Image (cartoon, rainbow, N blue to C red):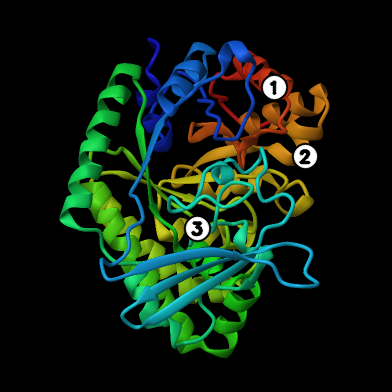
Amino acid sequence: MSKLSSKERLLSTIRYDVTDHVPLIFRTFGVNPPPDLAWSNQYKEAQTWLSLGTDAWLEVSLPQTFHPDVTVREWEEVIPGERWALMVKAYDTPAGVLRQEVYRTDDWVSPDWPMHKSAGDGIQLSGGGGIQLFDDYNVPRSRKHAIETEDDMQKLRYLLHPPSDETIARFQEKVDAVAQQADELGVPIVGWGSSGTDAVTWLCGVEGMVLMALDQPDAFNELLDIVHAWDIRTTEILLDTPVDIIIRRGFYEGTTFWSPALYRQHFAPRIKELTTLVHQGDRLMTYIMSVGFLPLLDTLVEIGYDAHYLLDPIAGGAHIDLRRVKSVFDKKVAVIGGLNEPVTLEQGTREQIRQEVSDAIQHLGPGGGLALCAAEAVVASTPWESIETVIEVWKEIRDIPKGDS
C-alpha cells in the first residue's frame, strides 16, 4: 500500500478500514519541545509532528458566548486569615446573578495549565488570568461554585445561550481557513462539540454534582438537559462546517464518579442522541473517557460512537486488560490511546515506555482500529526524551499486527 496522508490513515483507522500502519498522534497541553522544534500555533505544531513522521490533526471549537443581556463583572478580594486571594466573577442575567468564587492558589499560573497565561474575558488580574466559567482548576479551588441550587438553573440558560448568527458566521469563516491548512497538510479537522458532564462538574464541583444526582434527581436532570441542549446546538453548528471528527468530552463520566446504573440512566441516552446526530451528518464521533471505562464496555459499544479517545492503559493506577478491551470493541469502536503519560512517559524508564508501546500495538492493534496516543496529554513536565522513545519504538513495530500475542 502506498503511503497515506494523516487524514486518510486516521479516518481509515477509526472506520476499521485497511490502512498502511498504526497511526501515532500526540495530544499536547503546554508541552516543551526542543527550541529547534518549537511551534507558535497549531498549524506549525502539526507541521512539526508530520516532520517527525507521526500523525496530526487540526482542532476547532465554537467560542463560548452569553445571552446579549448578560453582563460580567470580575474582581479580587483579600479575606483576612485566608492564605490566598479570592477571585470573584459575577454573571448578571435577567434571571438573577450567578457568582463564582475561586482561590488564586500558588499554582494558578502553571506551565502545565497554559490556559491561565492570559486574562479571562479581557480582565487582567495580578499573576495572570482570571476565572473562566469552565475550567478544571476551578473545581478544587472554589469557595463557591456557579451552580448550587435549583434556582440557579434559569440563570444558567442565559450563559449556555445559542450563539448569534454573526458569531456562527465568523466561526464558519475560521473553520474554512483551518480547512485550507488541513488540506495543505493532509490532516483531518477535529471539532470539540460536546462537554456533557464535564460542564456539570465545572459548574457544580464533583461533590455538588454527585449529591445533586442522588438527592435532587429532578434538578440534576434539568441541569443535564440544559447542558445537553447546548451540546446539541454546538454539534449542529460544527456539522455545518468541514470538520471530519467531532469529540464528546467524558472525563468525568466514568465509574470513578458514577455507578454503571447511573451512567446508563443519565448519560448513555444523551450521548447516543449526539452520536446519531453526528452520524446523520456523515461525520465520525469520538468519545473521551480515560479512566473508569472498564465496567461500561458493553454499554459504550451500544451507544455506537466510532472511537474511544484517550484510553489510558493504567486507568485508576492499575494496568488494565487491553485484550478484554479489544475483544469487546473489535470492529465496533476504535481506540485512540493506549499510552499513559503521568506514570509511563513522565516517570518510566526507556524499557517501560518501549513495553507499553509494544503492548498497546500488540493487544489493541490486530485487525486495525488503533491510533496510538498518550492519555491524557503530553505536558510541560513530559520529558522530550520519552516522546522520542515512543516515536522510535512505534516506527519499529507500527505495522498492523495480524493477531494478538
Whole-Å distance between the Cαs marked 3 and 2?
Answer: 29 Å
Within 10 Å of disc 3 (Cα), the crowding (few <14, some 14-19, many 20+) is some
Front one among 309 and 161: 161
Quarter occupied by the C terminus: top right
Decide if residue 281 is in sight here: no
Q: Which mark is residue 384?
A: 1
Relative to 362, does residue 162 appear above or below in the rendering? below
Q: Quadrant of residue 354?
A: top right
Q: Earlier in the sequence, mark 3 or mark 2?
A: 3
Evaluate if marks 1 and 2 touch, with contact meaning CB atoms under 8 Å apart.
no
Q: Earlier in the sequence, mark 1 or mark 2?
A: 2
Q: Secondary structure at mark 2?
A: helix
Q: Which mark is residue 343?
A: 2
* Residue 184 place in picture, x, y as percent: 30, 17
Which residue does the numbered mark 3 point to in the structure image?
Answer: 132
Q: Secondary structure at mark 1?
A: helix
* Residue 361 place in picture, x, y as percent: 62, 29
Picture residue at 38% right of the left edge, 16% below the top: 4
Decide if residue 150 is in sight here: yes
Front one among 95 and 317: 95
Picture residue at 29% right of the left edge, 39% below the top: 243
Picture residue at 56% right of the left edge, 25% below the top: 402
